[in-house]
Image (cartoon, rainbow, N blue to C red):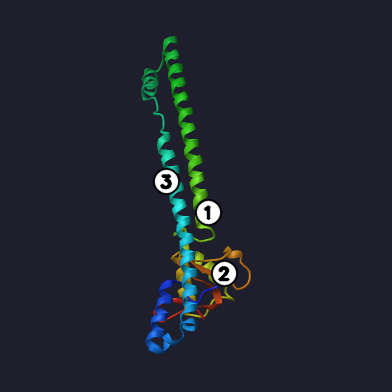
Amino acid sequence: MAMTETKFSDVCGLAAEWQRQVARHGAALGKDLRRNLKPLIRELHYMLDHMERRIVEYQKFAADVRSLAERMAKGGVPEVPVAALDNIGQILKAGSCNEAGLAQISEALVAIRNAARKREDSMWAYRRHAIQTYERFAKIKGDRFWIEEGTKGFADEIAKTYKVYMPPEPHASALLRKFIESWAHVEGGLLAEGDPMIVFDDGGRMPMSQVRVGSDRRLYRA
C-alpha cells in the first residue's frame, strides 16, 4: 500500500486510539465512518502488510538456515587415528628405535596426515556453510542493530548523531528504548540524511522528530 508514514508505531496503538475516540464521541463517531474510520483502516492495512512481508522474510530465513544446518550435520568429521598417535608415543617413549621403528613412525604420520586433510576439508565445508548462514543473517537483519551486547552504546550513538532531530523528552527516551530493544531502526542506517525515518518492526513508520509517547507508553506521530 502506498504510504509514506503512519500515525502510530503499531496496531495496538491504532486500536487504542479507536477505543479512545469511541469513549470520547460515542455514537456520533458512527455517523461519518469514511472520515473517522477509513484513515485508521488504511493505516491498519499498511501495518499488517508490513508485518506480513517481514514474516515471510523470517520464514525464508528459517528454511534456509534449517537447510544449511542439515547439510552441515550430514558432512561428518573423520576421526583422528588415535592408534597411530599412540604408536608414535610408544616409540618416542623408548627414546630410540631401529629402521623398523622409523618406518612405523612414517606410516603413522601418513595416516595422521591423511586424516588431517579430510578434517581440513570438513572444516572448509563447515566454514562455507557458516558464511552462507551469516549472509542470510545479514540479509534478514538489514540495517537493524541486533547485537545485544553494547546495544545501549548504539542507542547513545543515535542520540548523538541525530541530536538535532531527536524529539524532546520524555519522547526521546521512549524512542531510544525501542532501539535498545531492537524493535525500531533508522531507515537507511546511520548515514540517512535529513529527518530520519523510523521504521518499527510491528508496522509503523514515522519521522524521528515527530515520535511521541502517550500516557499508555505507546508511540505515535505528533
The amino acid sitting under disc 1 is: Lys
Q: Secondary structure at mark 2?
A: loop
Query: Which residue is pictured at 45% across the width and 55% down the height?
Result: 58
Q: Is residue 41 above or below residue 144?
A: below
Q: Return the residue at label 2.
A: 2
| Residue 84 x, y percent position in the rendering | 39, 21
Q: Earlier in the sequence, mark 1 or mark 3?
A: 3
Give neighbour class at mark 3: few <14, some 14-19, many 20+ (Cα, 10 Å). few
- For residue 178, say whether it is visible: yes
Please name the amino acid that badge 3 sits on. Answer: Arg
Please name the residue that numbered disc 1 is placed on. 139
Could you tell whether 36 is left or right of 162 in the image?
left
Pointers 2 and 3 in contact (CB under 8 A)? no
Which mark's residue is nearer the viewer, 2 or 3? 2
Q: Residues within 10 Å of mark 2 (few under 14, many from 20)?
A: few
Q: Is residue 36 above or below residue 50?
A: below
Q: CA distance from mark 2 to mark 3?
A: 34 Å
Residue holding disc 3: 66
| Three-letter code, disc 2 | Ala
Q: Is residue 25 left or right of residue 222?
A: left
Q: Disc number at residue 179? A: none
Which residue is pictured at 41% across the width and 32% down the height? 77
Secondary element at image label 1:
helix
Give the answer, above or below, for where 119 lies relative to 216.
above
State which mark lies toward you, 1 or 2: 2
Q: Earlier in the sequence, mark 2 or mark 3?
A: 2
Nearer to me, 82 or 105:
82
